[in-house]
Amino acid sequence: MKLYFLFGSLLLLFSCSKVPTDYPPNIIFILTDDQGYGDLGVYGATDIDTPNLDLMAEEGAYFTSYYATQPVCSASRASILTGCYPDRIGIHNAYSPGSKVGLNPEETTLAELLKAQGYATGIFGKWHLGDAPKFLPRKHGFDTYYGILYSNDMWPNHPQQGLGFNFPDIELYENETPLRVLEDQTFLTKALTDKAIDFILENKEKPFFVYLPHPQPHVPLFAAEDFQGTQGRGLYGDVIREIDHSVGRILETLKTEGLEENTIVVFTSDNGPWLSYGGHSGSSGIFREGKGTNWEGGHRVPGIIRYPKKIRPNTRIDAPAMGIDWLPTLVAFSGGKLPEKKIDGASLVPLLTGVSVRSPHDNFFFYYRTNELHAVRHKNWKLYVPHTYRSLNGREGTNDGFPVPYEMNEVNVAELYNLDYDPMEQNDVAHLHSEMVAKISKIADSIRGVLGDRLTGVKGSEVRPVGRVDE
């Protein structure tokens, strides 16, 4: 009888302490600012040590054709949190301090969806979706916030302050309270990581969502003293090494707390490198151009996800995906419900779990500069419609930390590239594939009818600064 009672007690104790099989996963989303495709070892970097991110890719999945939704800060971040093309929800470009517009509170964010499932939600880093009170993070589903409200160069120390800009002081916030004016940012990567880890430890008994959008490696560059002078690529490399160390600290925390099997960790960048800053910018690898253009270097960035419970190690995904896909993917993994309003993203779970090798999209649309459609990717083809774009025309790397002026180039007639055979976009084959040009041009017209296009005069989200085009 005593033996039976002891066995029953042990069984009850085990059942109470065991994490239920349907326990929703914790989610950590790490976002960098202006980091290029070629800035991690797993993506070909040889002059920056990134052991933690390389290991994360080895233990999970990494995308070779992942796209930031737009090549600019605010728009790209909006798509991650809403699952929508930024033009659908009326968000363009990058917001300056004091902007009158921001992420519409009526949109449903990833944080709100997870909060509805009982998640604790915290953001630690750069927001950049509006600094007016009604646009702040805690109006969009986050329980707590610690960070800066816009880009780290939007301060009086900007190299063009007084010439083209008149930025106020930049402040560090906790929730809605400014803590202090930032004069130096060398502490920030560590401080944000500390806050994220504290949040994990405080909420480890229930599911949590950590959004960690680092202000770095956006210029001006800041690395803590321990990382300065450690990398072959100068200060930029030092910054990436510190971010990699931050990722390692978070992964170690998950392991120590027994959380790693049931925690999804995502790492990506909001757009490609800001090449006008020379050696203080990242590398787009083999890809053409960088931030602020719709060529591959402006959009194609690292994309890594680790979830031991569901994703097999060494999963390489060549099928294209985009920032619009994170919300439906993470909601699918968590067992939640999608927003009631229309979104553009699709779940990547079949790709990540090996059920499929195909992208959930046949087409991706590349908008920029206040609702201008510049390009369409259709399967392995990418069509550029006529537009102007900025370029350094080979002058990258000539002016570290101070912007080199761009020149304007133009696509006069449609250009077509096969990304399977020509990922560097060097050989325009439009004249060889007129039927494909015509087909993708019709696809371009179809999205113009929904999202609009300022260049063609088709009305879209440009007339609704913080509203939807489908309402």
Image (cartoon, grey):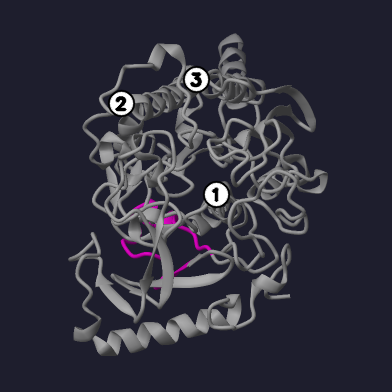
Q: Which mark is residue 253?
A: 3
The residue closer to the viewer here, 180 or 444, is 180
In the picture, the quarter occupied by the C terminus is bottom right
Mark 2 or 1: in front is: 1
> Does residue 444 sit above or below 210 in this rendering?
below
Q: Secondary structure at mark 1?
A: helix
Residue 378, given in percent of the width and then of the height, sits at: 36, 74
Q: Residue at x 71, y 39 (%)?
A: 142
| Quadrant showing the N terminus | top right
* Tag 1 residue: 73
Viewed as shown, does residue 237 lie left or right of 346? left
* Residue 33 image point, x, y percent: 49, 40
Image quadrant assignment for residue 416: bottom left
* Residue 349 among magenta residues: yes
Residue underneath mark 2: 51
In this rendering, would 419 be left or right of 77?
Answer: left
What amino acid does circle 2 point to?
A: Pro
- Report crowding for label 2: few under 14, some 14 to 19, many 20 or more residues within 10 A (C-alpha): some
Instruction: Please tell me which residue is depicted at 55% across the width and 57% down the height of the picture.
Output: 328
Q: Are marks 3 and 1 in contact (CB under 8 Å)?
A: no
| Rendering coords of residue 161 (x, y %) | 60, 38
Crowd band around label 1 with a 10 angstrom C-alpha radius: few (<14), some (14–19), many (20+): many
Q: Is residue 209 visible?
A: no
- Distance from Cα at disc 3 to Cα at disc 1: 29 Å
The front one of 208 and 90 is 90
Camera-nearest label, 3 or 1:
1
User: Magenta residues?
Assistant: 345-366
